[in-house]
Image: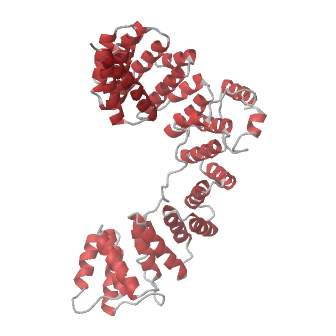
Amino acid sequence: MPRAAIRDHPLGLLPIRIVIPMSILRKIFLLSLLLPLCGMALDDADLNQFNIDQQLHQKSGPKLDPKRIINQSNSFLKEREPEMTEEEYALYEKIVNIMGSNADLAVRLLEGMMSEKQHPSPAFEFILGNAYYNAGKIDQAEKRYRSAVERYPTFIRAWNNLGVLYYTGNRFAEAATCFSKSITLGDHDPTTFGLLGYSLERGEDYISAEMAFMQALGGDPGNADWKEGLLRICISEKQNIRAEALVKTLIKDHPQESRYWLMYANILVSENRKLEAIVLLESAVGTGVAGPDELTLLGDLYAAQRLFPEAIAIYQKLPAPASLAGEKKLLAFAQMLTGSGKIPEAKRVLDSFKQELTPEGQIALHQAKADWFFAQNSMPEARKEIDSLLLLAPFNGRALLTRGRIYAVENDPSRATLAFEAAYRVDDTRYVASLELANIELKNRHYAKSVEYLQKALVIEKTPAIEDYLARIKTLVVTDDHLLP
């Protein structure tokens, strides 16, 4: 790679071998020179058509093993927590080693110790709660943890375990309360701060979550989960400078985690640094890290910059089932080009479909080709594509509309009417078919029928333009009535 490309690379000098074809680097370089001089790039509204505005992150929590946390709390701490009775402690010593390996047996032994006459100690309820949790009896575990903290409010580990129970059940507001209580009582473990941060984040209390993640990193600065949590907060709060610094560190420490590359690319896109995002994602492709999300975003960026061959090549790399998304994007892209009059570019995209498509892709390709031929005023070829489509999907409303428009251009109103009437029977195309039928009846001077179809369209969707159009046609109906003998 040229030194300039290395120097300007968004990641700086990282210990990663970046492989970007020279042809792409040249195009990116030339594009960077041309973009300030001409309106070559599509605007942000066009970018949205490619779904470029993906979610910046998914709130996937840290890699938590709740049973490990529960089981580690089985080692009882004397003089810092509530005490068991002698009988309870004797049983606890016998079963503590089987708590994690045979939870059902532990539950039976512990329950056998309980009696209706004497309420178990808070310490015993805590251990019983652990056994219930390991046995999958979450409601019973919650009941025991809750009883333990109500009877012994300074019981830190009971608060922690109750928090873990709520956390794993996606009850984040309750989890945050428990972790916060534990910290107030003196728990400074980074994991507690981290879980508090994540719970607060899910409750969208970003300021408090940021403080909790910072505390977690203070005790465990190498923990990727807490860095990623802080990164999500920075992205949510649009603190892009901090977010960029964090994501660079995460990529450097964990280069195989594709989601970090995607998050960084989205940060760059949000700052309109699209060329840097392209270079970054090509780096991910070159190192074999890029997955479907990264490839999709890269393809969208190439398409937005009108680098059509590169966009096509990237979309075609999408594996199944993501390949279906690639098909849809390419076909939507081709139709957008056709609609905007970029006929040669649309043709290149359509010609790129060499491999066998999914059934949905075949239907969409026939429609896209029909639209392209229609724009070229090649009605026989357009009709051939639509006929092929309708063999696959006889009740495809859009195809029926296209068939009607082809017949209308060919001055065959009777067949056009039949096609539009068929499209009218399809829910998704009833509104447009009503308007098309109204136009045909207007051309045939059947003003009353035209009014009827316009009124049907307005029942589906009221718009000032159609209401005004209807009022004008009604005057023709009145005029016609006056001319009758």
Q: Nearer the viewer, residue 22 or 396?
A: 396
Q: Is residue 447 above or below residue 162?
A: above
Q: Is residue 43 above or below residue 399?
A: below
Q: Quarter of the image holding residue 444? A: top left
Please state the horizontal and vertical placement of residue 211, each as a whole percent of the image: 61, 68
**Is any part of residue 393 visible from this angle?**
no
Please state the horizontal and vertical placement of residue 387, each as a whole percent of the image: 33, 14
x 52%, y 15%: residue: 347
Residue 14 horizontal side relative to residue 381, left or right:
right
Please state the horizontal and vertical placement of residue 390, each as a whole percent of the image: 31, 18
Q: Nearer the viewer, residue 432 or 479?
A: 479
Residue 239 horizontal side relative to residue 194, left or right:
right
Please state the horizontal and vertical placement of residue 289, each as a whole percent of the image: 56, 40
The chosen color scheme is secondary structure
Quadrant (top left, top right, bottom left, bottom right) of the C terminus:
top left
Q: Nearer the viewer, residue 468 or 25?
A: 468
Quadrant (top left, top right, bottom left, bottom right) of the N terminus:
top right
Q: Quarter of the image holding residue 124? A: bottom left
**Is any part of residue 317 visible from this angle?**
yes
Q: Nearer the viewer, residue 440 or 9?
A: 440
Residue 147 horizontal side relative to residue 272, left or right:
left
Q: Quarter of the image holding residue 13? A: top right
x 45%, y 8%: residue: 378
Numbered marks: total: 0
x 28%, y 16%: residue: 418
